[in-house]
Amino acid sequence: MARTIALTFVILLGGARAFAAPGIVPVTANTCVACHSTLADRRLANPTRLFGGQDVHRERGFDCVDCHGGSPTSPDKAAAHDASGRVSAMAFRGKPTGRAVIATCARCHSDAELMRTFAPRQRVDQATEYATSVHGKRLTAGDTRAATCASCHGAHGIRLVSDAKSPVFPTNVATTCAGCHADPARMNGYTLADGSPLPTRQFADYQKSVHFAALTKGNDLSAPTCNDCHGNHGAAPPNVGAVANVCGTCHAVFAQKFAASVHEAIFDKGCVECHANHAVAKPSDQMLSATAPGVCQPCHNGDDKTDKGAAAAADMRGDIERLKTGIEHSSAALAHLKNAGIEVSDPQLALREAGTRLTLARTEMHGFDPAHVAPILADGMTIVATVDRAAQSGAAELTFRRRGLFVSLGAILVFVVALGLKVRQIDRRDHERRTQSAGR
Amino acid sequence: MITIGDLPPRDGVGRSEFDRRHFLDALLIVGFTSTAAAIAYPVGRYLVPPESGEPATASVVAGRAGALRANSAAIFKFGSKPGIVVRTAEGELRAFSAVCSHLDCTVQFKSDTSQLWCACHNGTYDLAGNVVSGPPPRGLETFRVNLRGEGDDAEIVVSRT
Amino acid sequence: MSVIDWVDERLDLTEVRQFVAEKGVPVHAQKIWYYLGGMTLFLFSVQLFTGILLLLYYRPSAAEAYESVQFVVTQVKFGWLIRNVHSWSANLLIALAFAHFFSVFFLKSYRKPRELTWVSGMLLLFLMLGFGFSGYLLPWNELSFFATKVGTGIAGAVPVIGRFSLRLLRGGDDVTGATLSRFYGLHVAVLPALATALVGVHLLLVQRQGMSVPIDVEKKLKPGERLRQMPFFPNYILRDVLAWYLVIAVLAALAAFYPWELGTKADPFAVVPPGIRPEWYFLAMFHTLKLVPSHVLGIEGERLGVIAFGIAALFLVLVPFLDRRASRGERSPLFTVLAALGLVYLISFTIIGRYAK
């Protein structure tokens, strides 16, 4: 009795006041919140706090009972938690776990007509996708540790994917996945297809990659994170043969060249054979070699003269290095001339085209055929030669200026000598005049 | 000062002395004139405005209006970087930096799709400079275009702001 | 009728004719030092001339200064020549100004009645250093930007008015486009106006008082005896012109063999290049300030150094009033020694400052 009075009192005063923090829209006072917010057990009290903060469902008018069932208006605990379905519209189901989570979310999110009234563009096949994922398959097999909707999206205080604080915002995805996948204790017992334990280095590796750098430091939100290669809800590692397609969704040109090359049929892991899967580093020309630190070895042997692959690598690498050196020299020569005051913006512009050839060659190289790569680099060398000729004429202009000044220097010195003689002449005349007038 | 045409001294020093003095005076005139010319000539050429008009920091002439037909483009030099001026199918002039924001290759105009395309890794930009597809992380820098003059001979002036 | 007669009919050139006929230059063993003043004046007019030419193309904004200098040097016909001459002539001007200063100092030409000539000359020397400092920033390249930063920073060490002076010089707290505008105004308007006025005063005094003769030579004269004079027109002036042409020759040689570079455009947010130094004419002072310990008797070292230089400058300006012996026409070995010490200090510290790490 006292408790009921106290609760009623709390409803009247506490319901809104409990969420009186500025900026937070108070939950329409319902008995779930009124009671749970006062509970000592934080596991029961926290959800009310989170749900009362920023939550995408609450902001659209959804309530505790829409997922949990039960009655939001009875202060009586038994009635509020009524599981029979007689007191409330939806029977109380407590905290959903395992497959019940999927069912709870999919009740709305797989309903196209319902979702159209809230977010017409949002997909409604997440649950179907999820069923194909490793997580989904394990869950169906009875593994309660497998990730469900709530594991990544949260349950209370859910934010839109476009909200920077959401655990599934692009910059946060890897950290969310790593919450389980980087924890050896959590991953204990899971194995790869070949029986070896599931690695937990992926997040650490990914943090070393160019993709991570582009995402976090480069502010490029289109840079890939876990879900871009592994899938969103249908999360699974790409199969053998699929890797090149996955990388090719962004790196289209390279995938094209690779698909036409000899390595396409040979490589099991596609791009990953040379470029790694998580710790994808910024590629360098040094990789193109059959001797360490090149990645062509150990399949190809740089010391073996009959190894055609090693020879092809050496050819392409040699041409690339030649063009690179040529561009560096020309660039330095032009910079020197520019500093000395010769107009060089035209050759500088032309030299950029040589740089473009270098980029194109590095792309073409993924076809692994020197016959296609060589003409591009030869083109680049021609441009470098033209620029060098321009640099030479610039240097000639400098020499011409120097010579011109030299000539004028000669003229000046002639004049100086003549002037000196004139001075002496005038002095002598004055001296004669003086001695003459003195003599008279 | 220099007494040219001075009479020889009355006590007659001799023709050679007279000739030498005249020779010296002539040499001095020649010397002075040539050095004065060596100074005046460069100064004179300096004062004549050079062809390129002014430093190409803020704006540059990209070409003649008549030389650019509808749905075509031309590359021009802006400082030491390439720019591209496009005439849309409707006849409007637009100018962008031709440096692809991915790896600095020079973009080109594709008249079949009316888009700007980078041959290196297939980056595509629309005629507002925005990235349509491919690896470029940012759009192309957009420049302001104005016409100076009338008709086909009007200069296309591209400015940074 | 000649042109001169035509002008004479209208302006009465009697005084001018008298001046031309009578002006003479004393002849003695030390007369070679007389040419230094004229050479300095010649270089000053070269600077005015080439400076005005550069003004036609230069743009004094942080966004365009470097590019406009680049434009002059690469696009304008003979722009490289005008710019090279201006840069080299600036250095030669300051070198000759110092030489002129030292020759006057050693020969005691500052003594009575020429005290004001000395004072105006000292002020002109400071103005020339100001010209050098302000002009150096104008190409807005990396070296000049950081040298200006360091130099104006030192100005901040002056006691009492230091902070105010620093802000006044820089046009703010840091070296920015505002500094460039200010230095430009100083370099092309304020300093030239002051310098022209002072040169006018300096020349007027020299014409009125004639050339000073060294004390030793004066003492050897018998009472009533006058030194032999060389007529100014044409003997001395031809020699002057010869000296000026030699200066032109040196300028042309320097421009040919050591053309002035453009450098890289200033980036205010770049790291200060290691070993940044001011131009050679500030090196001695700069290196001295670097050697002063950071704190001396509770006073900040740099501040003490700046105060010391201020006192030294004031002392130099007042030398004619302090050197009593010279004013009486007597030999003044103390001041000769001071001059020698000053010269040795300047030369050695300039060299050390150039090569010190």
Image: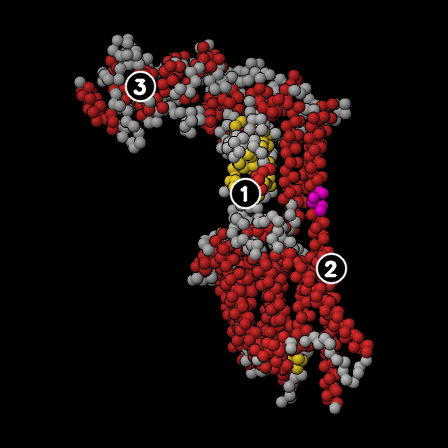
Label 1: how many Cα within 10 Å (few below 14, some 14–19, many 20+): few
Q: Residue at x 58, y 42 (%)?
A: B153
SS for dot 1: loop
C262 in relation to B4, above or below = above
**In the orientation shown, which residue stands out farthest toward the bottom?**
A440
Of residue B118 and residue B52, the one placed in the foreground of this image is: B52
Given the image, on which type of amino acid does mark 2 rest?
Val
The residue to which callout 2 is attached is: A407
Q: Is residue A308 left or right of residue C80?
A: right
Tell me if residue A290 comes above or below residue C278 in the rendering: above
- Indicate which label's residue lies in the foreground, 2 or 3: 2
Residue at 53% over, 36% down: B93
Q: Can residue B31 be seen in this view?
A: yes
Q: What residue type is labelled 1?
A: Glu
Name the N-terminal-most of marks 2 and 3: 3
Q: What element carries label 3?
A: helix
- Tell me which segment is drawn in magenta: A388-393
- Can you see residue C70? no
In the rendered image, residue A393, in percent from the top left (x then y), is placed at 71, 47
Looking at the picture, how far across and down is residue A9, in whole percent? Answer: 19, 24
Specify the quadrant of the image occupied by residue A210. top right
Q: Name the residue under label 3.
A: A64
The C terminus of chain A - image quarter: bottom right
Task: Work out how far the residue at label 1 is from the one at label 2, CA to CA, in angstroms.
Answer: 48 Å
What's the image's color scheme? secondary structure
Q: Which mark is residue B150?
A: 1
SS label for mark 2: helix
The one of A213 and A59 positioned closer to us in this rendering = A59
Subunit of mark 1? B
Of discs 1 and 2, which sits in the foreground? 1
Q: How far separated are the C-alphas under marks 3 and 1?
A: 71 Å
